[in-house]
Image: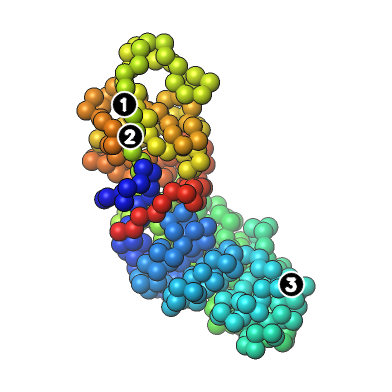
Amino acid sequence: MHSNGQTNWIEVDLGAIRHNVRRLREISGVEVMAVVKANAYGHGLVDASRAAVEAGATWLGVARIDEALALVREGLHARPIVLGYTEPERAAEAAAAGVRLAVYEREVAQAYSRCAGQAGQPLFVHAKFDTGMGRLGHSPQDGVEFVRWLGGQPGLQVEGVFTHLAEADEPHKPTTLSQLARFEALLAGLDAAGLRPQYIHAANSAGTLNFPQARYNLVRPGIAVFGLQPSETSPLPPDFRPALSWKARLASVKMLPPGHGIGYNFKYFTSREERIGVVTVGYADGFRRRPGNQALVRGKRVNVVGGVCMDQCMLQLDGVPEAQIGDEVVLIGQQGSESITAEEVARRWETIDYEVVCGLGARVPRVYR
């Protein structure tokens, strides 16, 4: 694919996103909320969200209200919901735009109620419950009373209740079943009181794949939408497709004599006459200063040598004698028969694939196909 004149760019396969969302709909059998927070996990908020909606996602989940409002401005036909905290002074803005908000504290809900009245239309809210993750959420023990109280607040309309699963990507652990048992007890209480709202949701990507009982009538996959596995212990079905590739260009290729230092602080010295290339990507783009980095040049793996610089890094090209200035370099993705996955990069950086793709710099252009 052409890079549109860029020296460092991300390619996003929108067809892969559509395919993955369709498969998540098939697997779950319920409505799908595509979680597109953090710039759609680095894939680009608007274009990735549009692809998800085209494939049948009826909800779009974000972490910040500005993300939700950006989607509304694009006219996407899906319900946007802010899954994290929203400042009360923006409740009227949310209500006017049809943006749903999460609620879990009475004090914040009261402030939402006061501000939402200014919009002249109800603010739809989803009550969040902490069933064991220890993050945001009201206690499920008095959850029935909380939902009853919430429904009595002027200007608020309780549309859903939800929780979040802490270890669904480790299905052998009992945590998820314990969380779901607490959530089920809450739902039973809401049913008995006639307070069960329209939407019940708990399952993230791993929950959607590993725990059918957690699907209810809405699932919230994020990482799986983009074809990346939730964890090493929770791989995706084999037909899911990664949507993101990360590429750059060779800007220099030269021979350096033995004993020549490479990069800042000379983290690498040539042991013989070596062919060294400079590639147009650095830590300001999200390519971390970690040992063992690799890239693909002309379908062959090569090692990054020396320290990664802010805008550039160096490659050992002895194994690719045909490499030349202007060649495409793949950091994540496939070239020929070789590939480097986000999961592989995550292992090398001692992190998770979520952090790899979310950490790709905003200055790196996204190119869509």
Pick the residue in front: 361 or 42. 361
Residue shown at 49%/32% (left/top)? 309
- The amino acid marked with disc number 2 is Leu
Alpha-carbon distance for marks 3 and 1? 59 Å
Q: Residue furthest right?
A: 107
- The amino acid marked with disc number 3 is Val
Q: Is residue 242 visible?
A: no
Residue shown at 62%/77% (left/top)? 93
Q: Is residue 221 left or right of residue 246?
A: right
Q: Which residue is mark 2?
A: 250
Examine the image and state in which quarter residue 120 appears.
bottom right
Alpha-carbon distance for marks 3 and 2? 52 Å
Residue shown at 47%/49% (left/top)? 363
Foreground tag (3 vs 2): 2
Q: Earlier in the sequence, mark 3 or mark 1?
A: 3
Q: Position of residue 175 (x, y in %)?
A: 59, 56
Q: Is residue 46 left or right of residue 114?
A: left
Q: Residues within 10 Å of mark 1 (few under 14, many from 20)?
A: many
Examine the image and state in which quarter residue 241 appears.
bottom left
**Is there CB contact under 8 Å for labels 3 and 1?**
no
Q: Mark 3 falls on what kind of element?
A: helix
**Quadrant into which the C terminus falls:** bottom left
Residue 260, placed above or below residue 355: above
Q: Mark 1 falls on what kind of element?
A: strand
Residue 276, placed above or below residue 84: above
Q: Earlier in the sequence, mark 3 or mark 2?
A: 3
Q: Which residue is mark 3?
A: 108
Pick the residue in front: 332 or 7. 7
- The amino acid marked with disc number 1 is Val
Q: Which mark is residue 253?
A: 1
**Is there CB contact under 8 Å for labels 3 and 2?**
no
